Amino acid sequence: MANIKDIADKAGVSVTTVSRVINNHPYVSEEKRKRVLEAMEVLEYTRNVHAVHLSKGFSNMIGVVMPTISLPYFAEMMAGIADAAAESGIHLSLFQTNYDVKKEIFALSQLKQRQVDGLIFCSKALSDDKLKEWEGPILLCQNSNKEGFSTISIPHQAAFRDGLDYLIAKGHKKIAICLARKKGMNSHIRIKAYKDALEEIGETFKEEWVIEKAITMNDGKALFHKWNRWRERPTAIFVANDQVSAGLILEARAQQVSVPDELAILSFDNHEISQLLGISTIDIQAKEMGKQAFAMLEKRIQGQPIESKVLDYRLIERSTV
Amino acid sequence: MANIKDIADKAGVSVTTVSRVINNHPYVSEEKRKRVLEAMEVLEYTRNVHAVHLSKGFSNMIGVVMPTISLPYFAEMMAGIADAAAESGIHLSLFQTNYDVKKEIFALSQLKQRQVDGLIFCSKALSDDKLKEWEGPILLCQNSNKEGFSTISIPHQAAFRDGLDYLIAKGHKKIAICLARKKGMNSHIRIKAYKDALEEIGETFKEEWVIEKAITMNDGKALFHKWNRWRERPTAIFVANDQVSAGLILEARAQQVSVPDELAILSFDNHEISQLLGISTIDIQAKEMGKQAFAMLEKRIQGQPIESKVLDYRLIERSTV
DNA sequence: CTGAAAGCGCTTACAG
DNA sequence: CTGAAAGCGCTTACAG
């Protein structure tokens, strides 16, 4: 593999000049530029990016940390990040953690070693405190009580409360909620909003009406049967993702339970499946979030100050409430 | 940031010894090893990976090329690749191409520049011929008529034919097929199998019964209406992916068309959605394919010979045929 | 077991 | 506009 020195020799110039040509530096005579380009052609030169990275001190690559790529929410987000990254010529490295703290720390160590210039955490198990022990540009896709990170998120508190109010306005009082993870950053906020809402309408909080660890369609299916077995049944369930809602609704239909008459369902995401099934849901623009997350991280990498952005959400009424 | 030289000075040894300690080279006296480790601790040493890459000549990273990460099929495959890569401590770089040849070529150029040690093409627009013009370890997730690549795939020809035979055995003669892309590597093979099957049962081939560019659930919905408008309607459609099938079936249900009585549907993928909807489908183990693709590419990178692997598929009977 | 030194292939002040 | 030289931070024969 020819290197910059070979090109210089062949073209009869210095390596500096070759480097200038490669980097489109203006101060090169037309004649030498031509000779260099020609030599590069003849010797089939390709630049060794590792040398560039070592010399420049950065890698033109960012890392994306998420539990799994095979859930639509994360895949959407990743697609948005990837689109934006491609436009900027930045590479993307995926760290699939399955919420394993060790794997999250591995990603952080890669940032420290300069394998990547920055990190986007789409969702994580590590606490913000632990995260703060690491240096380097980090962007969180959730709001944080700690200073030090740029963040982008939707106002989960408000969105969740809006959803509850919508259900209440539709006449529901017996409302259950279904979350992805107990420990999730947003679960806490949501449960708080849930308790508040219940209190306002004079309902008592029931621990068992907060369902957790629901992520897939099959979880939704299981959720139906759970609902079905309860002696006192909620008339509405507020579900934190479209996959679960879809499973729930399909199973309800299969079991001849009428939605929304016997059971109303409000969801989160607004993926294609919710459109097809007519699920009322709260659109959270995962792809757009990915795009903006990338842009914000880039700014951080370039030394701009920390910022926090809040994205809009939108309740989409369809036919399940 | 402390470097290897700083550590050497602090510990009173040579950089060679420091390097040996870092790389767990055996020939280091316990005493020096200890001093080095201590110095690393004190100075908060982190290795600069770019220097390692430059020196060693590889990057410990592979690239994954796919049209989009937000389709379940590709997301599944990526999840499989990512799991396997994480186990081997190899990094993953995503190239999302949207079947844009320029972006595929960009990925290839990155391989040439050593940004990545190898490339997995999950699906591509570029012809095998064009691909052959590039060097470096490449793995294709489809069979290829060219020598030079390791490949992993399912036997699309056989699988497609089996599906058709199954429909025929169920009494269908008026069968349409629905593919993702006209130019896809497998479309050609499948259309061939389709024609063969039709000929054997004495049916004439109709160009308009080969539907193309169907990828999403909404495409499936549109497909239903297309079917509904035909004056002569096929009694069965063989659809190349679960997303499309799901959209098709849900719309059929919504329009009170009975599946499979009025319209039978056989699908490909066996994603969760097909299970929930009871779609008869052909399981193609996308995640497993991703895992094995990674393992095979690694072998290539380590200099082992080219190989081709064929994965099993399995027709899963449910209730749509 | 240990170290001096060359090498990986670029970039970039600095001096002209 | 041009080039000699130092620097980025590691690894690795080679000689001891």
Image (cartoon, coloured by chain):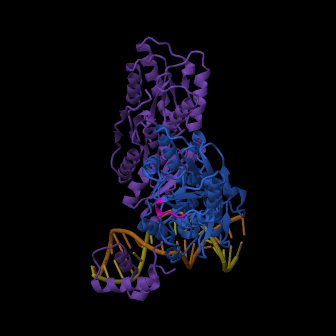
Chain colours: A blue, B purple, C yellow, D orange
- Relative vertical location of residue B138 with respect to residue B203 in this rendering, above or below: below
Magenta segment's dominant SS is loop
Q: Which of B280 and C2 is in front in this view?
A: B280
> Could you tell me if residue B258 is visible in this image?
yes
Left or right, residue B314 beside residue A268: left
**In x, y percent, where is residue B320?**
44, 29
Residue occupying image coordinates x 50% and y 49%? A244
Q: Nearer the viewer, residue B159 or B170?
A: B170
**In x, y percent, where is residue A63?**
53, 62
**In x, y percent, where is residue B104?**
55, 45
Q: Nearer the viewer, residue A245 or B2?
A: A245
Q: For residue A207: magenta?
A: yes
**In x, y percent, where is residue A235?**
55, 50
Q: Which of A302 and B206 is in front in this view?
A: B206
Q: For residue B174: magenta?
A: no
The image quarter containing residue A148 is bottom right
The image quarter containing residue B151 is top left
Q: What stretch is highlighted in magenta?
A: A204-208
Q: Residue furthest top?
A: B202
Left or right, residue B299 beside residue A179: left
> Could you tell me if residue A86 is visible in this image?
no
| Picture quarter with the C terminus of chain B | top left
Q: Number of labelled discs?
A: 0
Residue occupying image coordinates x 28% and y 83%? B29
Residue occupying image coordinates x 43% and y 54%? B82
Left or right, residue B299 beside residue A270: left
